Image (cartoon, helix red, strand yellow):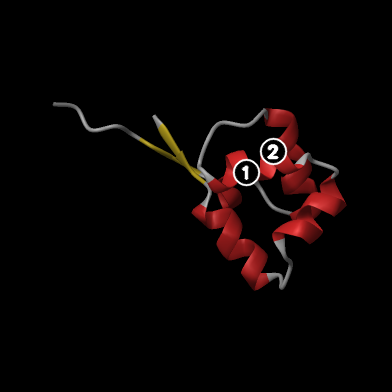
Amino acid sequence: MAISYKKLWKLLIDKEMSAVQLREKTGIAPNTMTKLRRDEEVSMTVLAKICKALDANIGDIMDLIPEEVQ
């Protein structure tokens, strides 16, 4: 399955918060933000910190996208 964090970026816009502000508020590393921008896997700990900082649920910040079966 693929991961999409499009919901996270939209939520940040809605809350008028930058990615830098999110990083500072959660204490996550810059390389983790890069992984998020690239829709790569990050730990549940990171996702939980983001959810707490944004007062959101995991489904509010990400989607799992099934890969097409051929």
Q: Residue at x 53, y 35 (%)?
A: 40
Q: How many marks?
A: 2
Q: Quadrant of residue 46?
A: top right
For the point 63% across and 32% down, the residue is 42
What SS does tag 2 mark? helix
Quick check: can you spot residue 31?
yes
**Residue type, numbered disc 2:** Asn
Residue 48 image offset from top left, x and y in percent: 74, 38
For the question of whether residue 58 can be seen, the reply is no
Q: Quadrant of residue 58?
A: top right
- Position of residue 47 relative to residue 21, above or below, is above
Q: CA distance from mark 1 to mark 2?
A: 5 Å
Q: Are marks 1 and 2 in contact (CB under 8 Å)?
A: yes
Residue 15 in the image, given as x and y percentages of width and height = 71, 70
Give the percent coordinates (x, y) of residue 18. Answer: 72, 65
* Farthest residue, direction left: 70
Quadrant in the picture for the N terminus = top left
Q: Nearer the viewer, residue 31 or 52?
A: 31
Amino acid of disc 1: Thr
Check residue 31 in the rendering and tell me which mark sits there, or answer none.
2
Q: Is residue 69 left or right of residue 1?
A: left
Q: Is residue 63 left or right of residue 59?
A: left
> Label 1 neighbourhood size at 10 Å, few (<14), some (14-19), many (20+)?
few
Residue hosting label 1: 34
At horizontal 59% and vertical 50% (from top left) the residue drawn is 61
Q: Residue at x 66, y 64 (%)?
A: 12
Q: Secondary structure at mark 1?
A: helix
